[in-house]
Amino acid sequence: MTTQDFHNSSEETFSPQNVRLMKDYYQPSQPEPFHQDWQRGVPIAIDLGRSMLRVGMAGQTDPSCVFPSITSRYKDKKLRRSLNMVGYDVFLDSSLKSNLKTPFDGAMITNWDSIETILDYSFLHIGVDSQNKVDSPVLISEVVAPPFQQRFNLMQMLFETYNVPKLAFGVDSLFSFYQNGGHSGLVINGGHNSTMEIPVVRGSPVINVAKRIDWGGQQAVEYLNQFLTMKYPYFPSKVNNYQVENMIHDYCYVSTDYQKELKHYLDLDVLEKKDILLEAPFTEVIKPEKTEEELEQEEKKHKETIKKLQLQARERRLQNLIEKENDYQYYLGLQGKMKSMNKRLVLSTLREAGFDDLEDFTTYIQSLERSLKKARNQDVGENDETDNNKPPSWSLIEVPDEQLDEEQLKEKRKQKLMKANFEARQRANQEKEEAKREADEAARKDENWRNTNLKTWLAARRKTLEKLKKRRKDRIRMKEELSDRKSRASQMRMKNIASLAGDEVQGKNGHKRRAAKVTIDNDPNDTFGANDDDWAIYRDIAKGSDVETEKVEEKKIYNIEEELLKYDSSFTINDTLQRQYNWRNSILHRFLRGPRDFDPDEQHQQHQIHLNIERIRVPEIIFQPSIAGIDQCGLSELCEQTTLKRLTSEPVFSGDDSNEVLKDIFLTGGQSMFEGFEERLRREFQSFLPVGTEFHVRKARDPVNDAWRGMSKWAASEEGQKSFIDKKEYEEMGPDYIRENRMGCLRL
């Protein structure tokens, strides 16, 4: 059994992987509906999130409107005016998506015109019928400890632009904690721009102990997008942030033991279960099927074209061979004449012919002779239907030109060409027969060597095999490097191209040549390439490995491997090329293409992305920010420092409070929705807390919407009603005056 047969027989049949389509932007069928929920005097709760905005009336269980915090400007040519689109309405037209923007830069508001547009849109869609005044108190969320300018601009906009009667602020994560019945605990909010940790003692947040990690949903999307760009640098489609965001939400999860799981994630059995195959949307090019008659006609035309091209190429090669033969005879004659010349005259003659010295001329003659031998073997004597051994008649060759008319002169030139062709074929046949005898003799000597000294024969075979494999590996590596125009190989390639335009030497007979060596190209006096090192330039210039060269090289490798399998007991099938380069043994292949083979010509596979280690790598950054290059401690270390060190130094904190905080570790925000997040955090707390310490980790019933529900519930309560600041107080005491509450609106 040969190595190729073994490889083919050992192929397993796998069922196709489940292909999931990437979710693209949400395409609404109609604009956002208008609601009539507004009631005069009833507070309006606005959760001004950095990714989504939720707005509704206090006392409701769900917000009236939920839409992305984005805007887009649209120019209507028919109406001759610009329209501002907000939220999902941006996706009604594909031209609007290119202009969408967010009013936030990180956690801070930077575009207040867009905020005003979003608030107009929000009030209008909940049914506010007053154009100049929103006659309802407004409760709006903010980040923890915002800069004064942020709160000042919001107060100024709501009081002076919308004429709201009352206004209050609060932190979204604390509203979620309130909605879920929290009293004392550690609130952990995995938000859009950061991950916050806020201790709450007896219902009041300890804001001066709150800490933040600069990692949230937006950073996770950017990180995975960059990661996929490096993983698939030549991916034919552009993967947008919305698609990446859905990958994170749908397929990423928190590993309970990251290092252990990562170590075995690319094992085939593990990859078979956990690898996610996603396909980007694309337009498939389907070639029309042709009838058998059309295929036969195309095949016939193709064969005729090939035959015609072969004849033309053969004629050109023959003409070049004849020119080389003439040049060879000319230089041999020149060499004979120089035997009777003195050294000075010889040097003068050589320089007139374009040579530096006698050694240069001798090298050129030898190189030209070798090139002629190769040309005869390659270009002459193949597929000849005539009898090459029977010399034809050339009756006009010896007749002087003066005795011939115009037609006979044409026939004489034709006979000269035919004679040269016949002689070249004769020499080629002789050289082929000689080469065959040499090959048979080499095979006989090799067999004799194997029979007499098997040990040295095997060592030589192994050495040859290693050289061939190394050459093949270097060629593949060079091909990959040349695909990157910024690589060193590509830069050297450009230098080598420039070097091909070097100085040429004009010979006496009118031929141009380089140095004093020759190749078997179309120019018989072009000396570039006789030295093996010169061919490296052409290898560098080539875009990829020559297919024929690769096939010949692989055939040599297979032949040597078959001999070693037959005669060397220490050489097994696992040492063969097919087994060594099997995709199952390539970690890089499994990382890029999953637990299946890859066909680069198949359109669907070209547009597919495999998610494997990214599924646990992206969420792990919350616990190990150094993975993404963030010089901050992870969430577990932050919790340890807060619960065991920082809180104990606060005057409002006591031993009983410590137990109460640990008994309610509360998770909220979009990042907390990762599968395994609770279990991982539970293990982290167990690792640093003293043995026997009682603690409890829980997640919000709805980590995304509970913040608004808490705002709705709190705004309708008696405590919430007392926390509003009215417009009269704003006008009297200015924007730096606030009424503190236990929802995070504090004067720090």
Image (cartoon, rainbow, N blue to C red):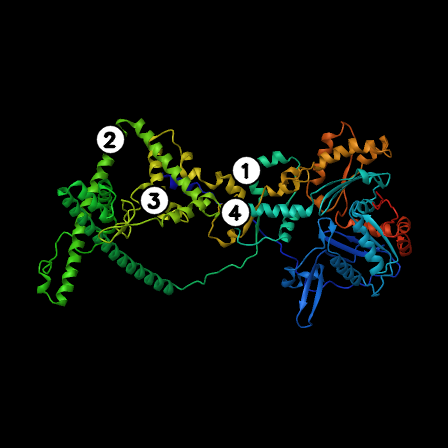
Mark 1 or 4, closer to the camera? 1
Q: Which quadrant of the structure image shows residue 256?
A: top right
Asked which secondary structure carries label 1, the reply is loop
Spatial separation of the CA atoms under disc 4 and disc 2: 50 Å
* Disc on the earlier residue, 1 or 4: 4
Residue type of the residue flagged with mark 3: Trp
* Disc on the earlier residue, 2 or 3: 2
Residue type of the residue flagged with mark 1: Asp
Could you tell me which residue is drawn at 16 percent across and 61 percent down?
Answer: 413
Q: Which quadrant of the structure image shows residue 635?
A: top right
Query: Label 1: which residue?
Result: 267
Query: Label 3: which residue?
Result: 535
Residue type of the residue flagged with mark 2: Asn
Q: Is 705 rendered above or below residue 358?
A: below
For residue 448, the mark is 2
Regarding residue 631, the answer to whether it shows in the image is yes
Query: Label 4: which residue?
Result: 15
Spatial separation of the CA atoms under disc 1 and disc 3: 42 Å
Spatial separation of the CA atoms under disc 2 and disc 1: 47 Å
Spatial separation of the CA atoms under disc 2 and disc 3: 35 Å
Residue type of the residue flagged with mark 4: Ser
